[in-house]
Amino acid sequence: MSSVAQKKGFGATLWDWLTTVDHKKIGILYFLGGGFFFVLGGIEALLIRWQLYKPNNDLVSAGLYNDLITMHGTTMIFLAAMPILFGFMNAIVPLQIGARDVAFPFINSLGFWMFFFGGLFLNISWIYGEVPDAGWTSYASLSLASPGHGIDFYAIGLQIAGGGTLMAGINFLVTIINMRAPGMTYMRMPLFTWTTFVASAMILFAFPPLTVGLFFLTFDRMFGGNFFHHAMGGNTIIWEHIFWIFGHPEVYILILPAFGIFSEIFSTFSRKRLFGYPSMVFATVLIGFLGFMVWAHHMFTVGLGPTANAIFAVATMAIAVPTGVKIFNWLLTMWGGSIKVTTPMLYALGFIPSFVMGGVTGVMQGAAPLDYQLHDSYFIVAHFHYVIVGGVVLAILAATHYWWPKMFGTMLHEGLGKVTFVFFFIGFHMTFLIQHWLGFWGMPRRVWTYMNDQGWDMANLISTIGALLMAVGVIVLVINVIITSVKNVKVSNDPWGDGRTLEWAIESPPVFYNFPTTPLVRGLDTVWIEKMEGNEAGYTAAEPVKDIHMPNGSIIPLLMSFGLFIAGFGAMFRTETSWGLPVLIIGLAWTFVCMAARSLQDDTGYYIKKEELLRDMKRKGGQA
Amino acid sequence: MAEIEVYKRTPAEQALLKKRAKQSMKGQVMMFSLMIFLTLVSFSMVVAFQNDVAGFSKYFIVPMLMLFAAVQVGLQLYYFMHMSEKGHGIPQMFMFTGAMLGFLIPLTFVTIVWW
Ligand code: HEM
Ligand SMILES: [Cu+2]
């Protein structure tokens, strides 16, 4: 393979993307896949809000409404927010630690394809016409009673996608532990790398419970199991525990990378070192740890008893402490900085008050007696949208603008970016602020319609208008992306001019081997240090130019995931059709054949020759 | 990554490595004997209990067996799986975190779900 740009046909390009193990391309695949599901989940949200904008509306039936809320929540968490964050992690983390690739390029690509096929499987339920309808939490007493194949799509689709997530997490852990450039000690890692590290560790411990829970659900629904059937000696509450043992860490898996993104943005555009870096790292680790100790705060009203409720209430409130530490550190990073209000910075500024409000309502819900009032009301809906939209989604939008040049080599239009922000931010608060009061006024969560004149009509209308404003913001963003891609004006290494971390030391987008020579890291914000010392190249090499070893692409991850996808249909139709069981077996066998093929194949990768690297460097006008 | 490098050790290095290897071998053999000894003691205790030897009650033997088992796991991990050597900090941290969660979560289950 040559690094010199060549024109390739459509087929060759497609093949290149399907077989890629390059972390930057997998990052883009995650970003596009997650972006697609984000739009899908957004359309579902708009339908929900359209149904609720006036009392006694009949846009959708009660059953379809349940389908919509279930698929909206599941899609947004598992198929939109997490994959888009993985996209940024893939694209940026190896660059930030000065690596040429991730530790397990093959597993990385397998993780993406399992997410893709799992998401596809889940959404085929819409085409098949039987859709999951027990909420994204899929409590067993509901999900076991749900007729049709809806919940089967949920259990199997999430099993496949969840496997992919686990692989992605393991890959990032090993990458960050083993592939850091010389001098990149743990306490010099940029905050986005740190949060990726902790989030990956949380994935490692949180996803196996989900896997187990989903297997139990699959057995109960499709193979005659009785794990959750109370009449058969099972226990329906266990699902709730298992789900939340996974579920609460999951919300921190989402928010920690968002914290990392904002930490980078605050320090870049305040043009100042992140305030209290060690305490930021410590807070991240502590949040990751405490995140496993609080799951039962989702179950205060289940009847665990006052002792259990009290313990979990105290543990829950403890999490607010490290979170508060972070908020103050961000404020103090800006304090005295020379602030430049770019689009990403605008999102960061909007994030602080929004997320604080979500955190405060979280602590309120953490007080168990109060939660008896709040639980299952619109207050809960307001809380988690304040943390997820006000935290995670704002971070995703900020990172889209911030790292777009590094991922795609062009700069999104700043003016349009700010327009997106204004629409989205106003729409967001308009949609969800009023829902706190809807909760106080007694509107229950997950109802498909309501009677008029209970004092809820106006609030619901306002909320729906807010949702439309958010949609306008996203449409402006899409237009921005299209305009930018058509114009295709290439940018330099450090288009913001204030880059501090290693990704800004190399061109946008980077060559496929990232760094011609491994960089030497001399401190936190290593590129900033080099720039201050007048080093135009952006980094100091740790070694002379020499041959680089790279992995070969492979189609096997796609084929392997496809086998699981097929097997899923077999499991689902096993009892009612004659082809079910054979298809289940063939699908699994296919996956095992792919695994064997991978194990037996002797693929040691290839080398990029030193001469080629020197030629590349000369072409770019850099020094060797 | 598969970079192949040929590197010749100096005699001093060679001697040092040899000494270290010898020491580690000594440690391994000692720990192995200790483990065999612990296993022997465990079995003897059970046999003694079955033959009603005075002093070997159930309430003494069960905790002792648990203790011996814990020691054996530790020896296994630290000596035979080389966790005592340098560069194993991170795996240790992950293992202990996992073990702690694996202990705490079932503990909550027995106290608040199934009590
Ligand atoms: C200060 C930190 C936080 C505290 C104290 C907190 C507390 C709580 C509590 C007690 C509940 C359960 C309320 C109920 O159902 O009655 C809850 C629900 C929820 N929280 Fe938080 N939370 C915090 C931060 C977050 C973050 C950062 C996220 C996500 C990024 C998040 C996402 C959610 C979600 C999705 C739910 C609803 C789950 C459902 O029932 O579907 N929370 N939170
Ligand atoms: Cu929670």
Image: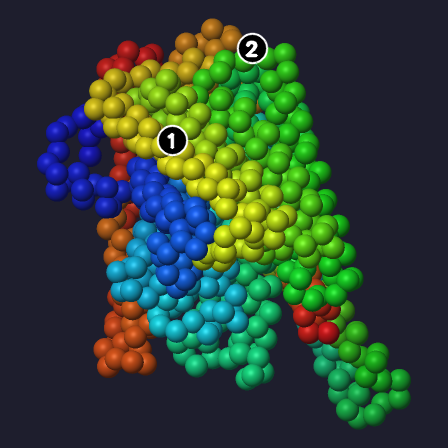
Q: Residue at x 37, y 61 (%)?
A: A61
Which residue: 29% across, 64% down? A129
What label sits on residue A91 in the rendered view? none
How far separated are the C-alphas under marks 1 and 2?
28 Å
Residue A338's disc is 2
Which of A84 and A174 lies nearest the eye of the viewer? A84
Which residue is depicted at the point 67% across and 70% down? B113
Expressed as whole percent of the image width and height from the top left, the position of residue A403 reads 40, 27
Which of the two residues, A622 or A354, is positioned nearer the viewer here? A354
Determine the residue located farthest toward the front in the rendered image: A453
Q: Determine if residue A352 is in view.
A: yes
Closer to the eye: label 1 or 2 = 1
Q: Which image quarter: residue B96?
A: bottom right
Identity of the amino acid at label 2? Ser
Mark 1 C-beta to ligand 1 under 8 Å: no
Q: Chain of mark 2?
A: A
Q: Name the residue: 36% across, 32% down.
A: A472
- Classify 10 Å Cα crowding around label 2: few (below 14), some (14-19), many (20 and above): few
Q: Quadrant of the C terminus of chain A?
A: top left
- Hey, which quadrant is residue A571 in on the image? bottom left
Circle 1 is placed at which residue position?
A473
